[in-house]
Image (spheres, rainbow, N blue to C red):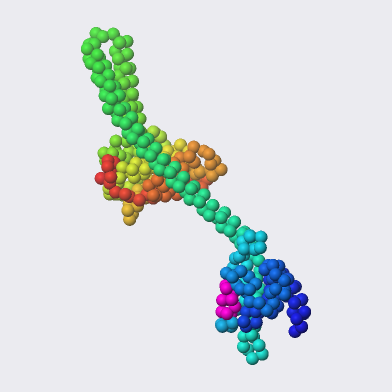
Amino acid sequence: MDVDLQRAILNNIPDQAWLKDVGSRYILVNDAFMAACGRTEAEILGRTPDQVWSEEWGQVYLRTDKAVVASGIRRRYEESRHARDGSLRWFDTIKMPVRGRDGEVVGTVGISRDITDRKRSEQALLAEVEKGERTRQELLASRAQLRELSAYLQSVREAERTRISRELHDELGQSLTALRLGLSFIEAQQGSDADEACRKHVQMLKEIADSTVEAVQRIAADLRPPLLDELGLNAAIEWLAESLSERERGGITCELALHPVGEISAEVSTAVFRIAQEALTNACRHGRADRVLVELSDTGGVLRLVVSDNGRGIDASKTGHRRSLGLVGMRERALMLGGKLAVTSEKGGGTRVEAQIPNTGCSGKGGTR
């Protein structure tokens, strides 16, 4: 093939292109190649790479040429080098053997494409991914810290509930009982000749004292039922169901399927009790259910609580509703202890709350028997 025709073909290739003999001497190069190395055709032809490029890159090109000639196999690789303006450029280079009529390798042909823009895009994308990963890790760490804070606040809240409940029961309850006994003493001292109006007044005060004692006991139990600490989780849930039925004056029926659950830590028993309490409250106040089933079991070291009702279900559009916030609180209680909570509901089809919490065993007070 005529050399001018070969040169014309190479110059129609936008990438650097060249032809070398078996000794790595340049036989033909295109304009893109001359522009890349900053030399004229006369300065390139008949010379080897170490005489055209820097000593460092010349040796690299000589080694790859020898490898192609020796193996007779096409090679492709990416390389980077500094351009004449000092900027770092990336190239995708392909070198192939050129064979004579007898099949012997008589030279090499190569083409090198500038992929600097693609490389910069890849690096920018990688940087964005790494930045996004760092942001994700920071977000996860922030969520973990918030969850730890929430767990701490929950424990502080429960401790405060316990303290207030104890003070209401012990101090205020005792004072009211003493007041009640005092009124009974006054009533006994009045005798049969006491003024009717005075007797009625004393009787009214006794009734007020009795109702106040009952109210204090109920409030104290709501804050922290003593059954939870004294008799365990099953007994506390039974009390919870009975209390709900009494408050609703028989308007809701609570069915219980409570199985023995072994030793439970105070944290776990409190969390399960509060989830049951919130679920029953939702079923009554928001779901307007008249029948609720509460199931509790311990399977493979995981406590499973299920509260299902036949109420009107949850309206998913009311995401800011008090009930939705209650669901978030239940879910957080489960997550803080390494568990999970699922809520399934259909409008008009009732609601089912299922919590699964790892049983960490007994630690401190509050374990069930």
The front one of 301 and 259 is 301
* Residue 215: image location, x then y, percent: 34, 27
Q: Left of 2 or right of it: where is 159?
A: left
Span shown in magenta: 59-68
Q: In which image quadrant can residue 12 be found?
A: bottom right
Q: Is residue 340 above or below residue 161?
A: below
Q: Left of 17 or right of it: where is 325?
A: left
- Quadrant including the C terminus: top left
Magenta region includes residue 12: no
Q: Name the residue located 22 percent from the left edge and 12 percent from the top edge.
A: 189
* Residue 229: image location, x then y, percent: 28, 39
User: Is residue 254 visible to us here?
Assistant: no
Q: Is residue 99 above or below residue 252?
A: below
Residue extending farthest to the bottom is: 102
The front one of 35 and 68 is 35
Q: Name the residue located 39 percent from the left edge and 33 percent from the top edge.
A: 247
Q: In this view, does 1 lie above or below 255?
A: below
Total label count?
0
Magenta stretch secondary structure, dominant: helix
* Residue 100: image location, x then y, percent: 66, 88
- Quadrant including the N terminus: bottom right
The front one of 356 and 102 is 102
Q: Left of 309 or right of it: where is 315?
A: right
The front one of 282 and 135 is 135
Q: In this view, does 2 lie above or below 345?
A: below
* Residue 340: image location, x then y, percent: 42, 50
Q: Name the residue located 54 percent from the left edge and 52 percent from the top edge.
A: 131
User: Is residue 141 visible to us here?
Assistant: yes
Q: Name the residue located 52 percent from the left edge and 49 percent from the top edge.
A: 135
